[in-house]
Structure formats: structure tokens, C-alpha cells
Image (cartoon, helix red, strand yellow):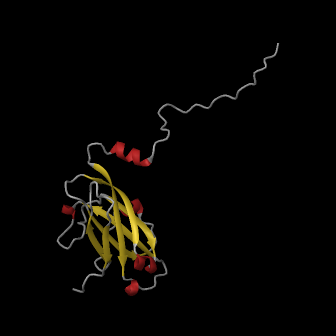
Amino acid sequence: MTSSKPKSSPRRRRPLGTATGASWVALVAATTVGIGSVHLVRAAVSADPSHLAASHDGYRLIVQSYARSSLDQGARPRSSVRPLASTQRAITPAELARGVAVDMLGIHAEKDAPVVVAWVESGRPDLEYDALEARPAADAYYGVASTIVGPEARALARLVLKRPPAV
């Protein structure tokens, strides 16, 4: 006697503990319990590109956020602190002239809103750890601005990069 049911192929089972449908944002949030709150850092970065020399390697824009207390008197990050968030990307002088929107996911533990710093330097966006360990050179086109945390967080921190005055 033959069965009229077609044979089904064996099911592939996933090992126990395999996450399904979890987003990377959910994973970050789950691993930061007790550290502070996860927030979106939004920045608009621009610069007058007329002083940038043509670079055969192009330029990279580095944007980081810090606790306000992590900056020195010159509004530069101290070498011993790590940013709360960091990103890097390739940039052209024309893009800097128009302005570039940058979004980063950050961890915020202070009551005060974090500070965003940005600079542009020659090279491709190939720094390790998405530029978490990068620091601006003394003569870099550099900018700093406060962010907004809370219901108004859709507002951008606006940074205009400028070369520091000659000492």
C-alpha cells in the first residue's frame, strides 16, 4: 500500500540560542544596560573648502561625540578619553561646501548633552574601529557643537569646520 502524501524534506533546525530577527541596534541596547541611554547623535558639518589643497588620497571626515568634561580648554578631546560615538566617511571639498548630515548611535551617561567634534583630514576612511581612536591634528579644519538629547533630538548639532589661528 502506497501513501498518497508527498514526502516532505527534512527541516533544518537552528541551533538553540541563535538570534533571529534581532537588529544591531537592539543588540547594542541590550548590552548597554546600566551604562546610560542609547541615543542618536545628529550633526550637520560644513566648511569653506577654498583652503583645502587637492589631495590625491581624497579626504576623510571624522565625527565624534564626547562628554563635555572630556574636552580640554581648547575644546579638543583629551588623548586619554574615548568618544561616546564615532564615525568616518569619505568627503569631497564640494560636499563640505554644501554641508553633510551625519548620524551616529551613541551611549550617553551624563545629565548634560554630549558635545560633537568633527574634523577633516587627508586620506581615505580606513581608520580602525571607525575612528574611535582618531584625534585631530593641531592644524586640522575643526569644529565643535553641543547636541540636544530628549524629545527635541531631531535638531542637528551644526558644525562649521575652520582652521585654527596660527600661533
Name of the residue lying farthest toward the right: 1
Front in this rendered view, residue 75 or 101: 101
Name of the residue lying farthest toward the front: 152
Total numbered labels: 0
Residue, x 21% and y 62% (percent of image)? 68
Residue, x 26% and y 48% (percent of image)? 36
Q: Is residue 136 visible?
A: no
Left of 93 or right of it: where is 14? Answer: right
Examine the rendered structure and indicate whether residue 51 appears above or below residue 8.
Answer: below
Q: Is residue 35 visible?
A: yes
- Looking at the picture, how far across and down is residue 105, in whole percent? 36, 56
Examine the rendered structure and indicate whether residue 116 appears above or below residue 151.
Answer: below
Task: Locate the N terminus by quadrant.
Answer: top right
Residue, x 32% and y 78% (percent of image)? 140
**Residue 98 figure quarter:** bottom left
Task: Locate the C terminus by quadrant.
Answer: bottom left
- Looking at the picture, how far across and down is residue 42, in whole percent? 35, 62
- Looking at the picture, how far across and down is residue 99, in whole percent? 40, 74
Name of the residue lying farthest toward the top: 1
**Residue 45 figure quarter:** bottom left
- Looking at the picture, how far across and down is residue 95, in whole percent? 44, 76
Name of the residue lying farthest toward the left: 73
**Residue 5 figure quarter:** top right
Left of 40 or right of it: where is 95? Answer: right
Left of 98 or right of it: where is 158? Answer: left
